[in-house]
């Protein structure tokens, strides 16, 4: 079995569905690529760092926080401005603004050592990249997943459960 790359979001999921998706795909390593490790409101308390780490531990999944792989506050502001200009909300966004993509590439991906990152995991690891957006195309995790998949000459898969 060789290393696999997945992504998952939290918006639009239920607690049971979220953790079932991780289990169903045999996830071994959970990489949190959020800058802030909390989600507002009671609906997604299971995605807040303390609760999330505790649940993953009981599932035998290694939790890793990589704030260096989250967009800078300045780059996040670019997406927020684009969302405001188009009337989209963060939870309703279907894609990323080109200025955000360019900013994220500059912030993180241009200096990212894909081989070094992947080398931190066993050869048979099943790695999931986590952020909050439901659609991977609306989140930086898809940009990161694509870069990692290219380094491994593979595809990546989103496992966010859809209601």
Image (cartoon, rainbow, N blue to C red):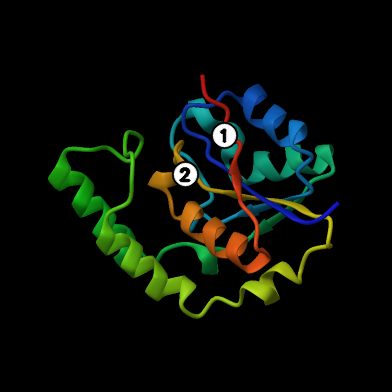
Q: Which mark is residue 160?
A: 1
> In this orientation, which residue lies closer to the viewer: 110 or 64?
110
Residue for badge 2: 136
Residue 101 falls left or right of residue 5? left
Residue neighbourhood size for the residue with mark 1, other residues' Cα within 10 Å, grouped as few (<14), some (14–19), many (≥20): many
Q: Residue at x 32, y 41 (%)?
A: 90
Q: Give the percent coordinates (x, y) of residue 29.
A: 74, 52
Residue 59 falls left or right of residue 129? right
Element assignment for label 1: loop
Q: Residue furthest left?
A: 85
Q: Give the percent coordinates (x, y) of residue 13.
A: 54, 26
Q: Residue furthest top?
A: 163
Residue 17 falls left or right of residue 77? right
Please count the marks in the image. Answer: 2
Q: Residue at x 27, y 37 (%)?
A: 89
> In this orientation, which residue lies closer to the viewer: 80 or 57?
80
Q: Give the percent coordinates (x, y) of residue 120.
A: 76, 69
The answer to whether the residue labelled 1 contacts the one labelled 2, judged by CB atoms less than 8 Å apart, is: yes
Q: Residue at x 50, y 80 (%)?
A: 111
**Above or below, 48 relative to 155:** above
Element assignment for label 2: helix
Label 1 to label 2: alpha-carbon separation? 9 Å
Image quadrant in which you'd find residue 153? bottom right
């Amino acid at each position: 079995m060789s290393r696999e790359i997945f992504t998952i979001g939290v918006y639009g999921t239920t607690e049971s569905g979220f953790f079932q998706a991780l289990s169903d795909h045999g996830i071994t390593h959970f990489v949190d690529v959020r800058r802030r490790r909390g989600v507002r409101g009671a609906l997604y308390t299971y995605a807040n760092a303390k609760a999330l780490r505790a649940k993953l531990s009981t599932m035998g999944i290694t939790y890793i926080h990589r704030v260096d792989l989250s967009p800078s506050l300045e780059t996040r502001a670019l997406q927020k401005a684009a969302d405001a200009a188009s009337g989209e909300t963060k939870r309703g966004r279907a894609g990323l603004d080109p200025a955000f993509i360019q900013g994220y590439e500059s912030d993180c991906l241009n200096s990212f050592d894909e081989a070094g990152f992947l080398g931190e995991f066993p050869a048979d690891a099943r790695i999931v990249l986590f952020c909050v957006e439901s659609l991977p195309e609306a989140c930086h995790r898809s940009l990161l997943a694509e870069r990692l998949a290219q380094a491994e000459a593979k595809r990546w898969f989103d496992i966010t459960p859809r209601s």
